[in-house]
Image: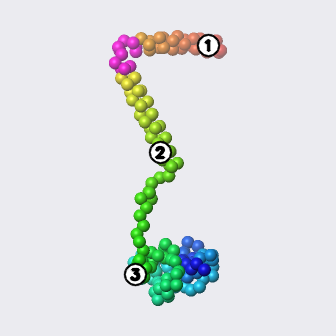
């Protein structure tokens, strides 16, 4: 039988309270246990003495007969000086997954393409500004004349309609 020292949740919704219990590892989290060896109240301040309460001699007994603590309980035992816990190092902890990396590369490519398009538009604008100034008014003049010719025709159409 595999024995675990783990947390069993109690308390109301959004008001957790945990018992530190020794139980068969195959049992449900909040199910039948062999012995309660402490409590944990996460709602209390971290420096509060009542946050974690342990019965050290019973924990030492269960560790002696082969009980394995869960990671969270192991942290409590390390802090209490009962059981040494080796520090874990995960160098890939903050590294994004493959899909996130692909999305980031696609986004970078889109940004680069947008920057190139902006530079090209800027260069075209500079080239248009460098062109002779005589061309711009010549292009606008026929448009103004056409608008002026349309205005009297619209006035004539209104007069006929009346």
Q: Earlier in the sequence, mark 3 or mark 2?
A: 3
Give the residue pinned by disc 1. Answer: 157
Find out whether the residues at labels 1 and 3 contact each other: C-beta distance under 8 Å. Answer: no
The answer, for residue 38, to whether it is visible in the render is: no
**Residue drawn at x 49%, y 83% as measured from the top left:** 63
Residue 17's label in the rendered image is none
| Region of the chain picked out in magenta, as a range | 127-137
Q: Is residue 141 above or below residue 99?
A: above
CA gap between label 1 and label 3 equals: 100 Å
Residue 66's x, y, as percent?
52, 81
Query: In the image, 112: left or right of 150?
Result: left
Give the residue pinned by disc 2. Answer: 104
- Tag nearer the camera, 1 or 2: 2
Q: Earlier in the sequence, mark 1 or mark 2?
A: 2
Residue 81's label in the rendered image is 3
Find out whether the residues at labels 3 and 2 contact each other: C-beta distance under 8 Å. Answer: no
């Amino acid at each position: 039988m595999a024995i675990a020292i783990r947390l069993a949740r109690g308390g109301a919704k959004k008001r957790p309270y945990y018992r530190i219990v020794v139980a068969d590892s195959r049992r449900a989290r909040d199910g039948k246990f062999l012995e309660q060896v402490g409590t944990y109240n996460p709602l209390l301040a971290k420096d509060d003495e009542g946050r974690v309460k342990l019965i050290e001699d019973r924990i030492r007994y269960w560790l002696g007969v082969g009980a394995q603590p869960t990671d969270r309980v192991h942290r409590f035992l390390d802090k209490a000086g009962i059981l040494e816990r080796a520090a874990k190092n995960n160098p890939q902890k903050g590294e994004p997954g493959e899909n996130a990396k692909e999305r980031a590369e696609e986004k970078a490519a889109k940004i680069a393409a947008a920057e190139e398009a902006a530079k090209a538009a800027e260069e075209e604008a500079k080239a248009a500004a460098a062109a002779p100034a005589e061309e711009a008014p010549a292009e606008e003049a026929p448009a103004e004349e056409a608008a002026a010719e349309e205005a009297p025709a619209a006035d004539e159409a209104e007069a006929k309609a009346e």
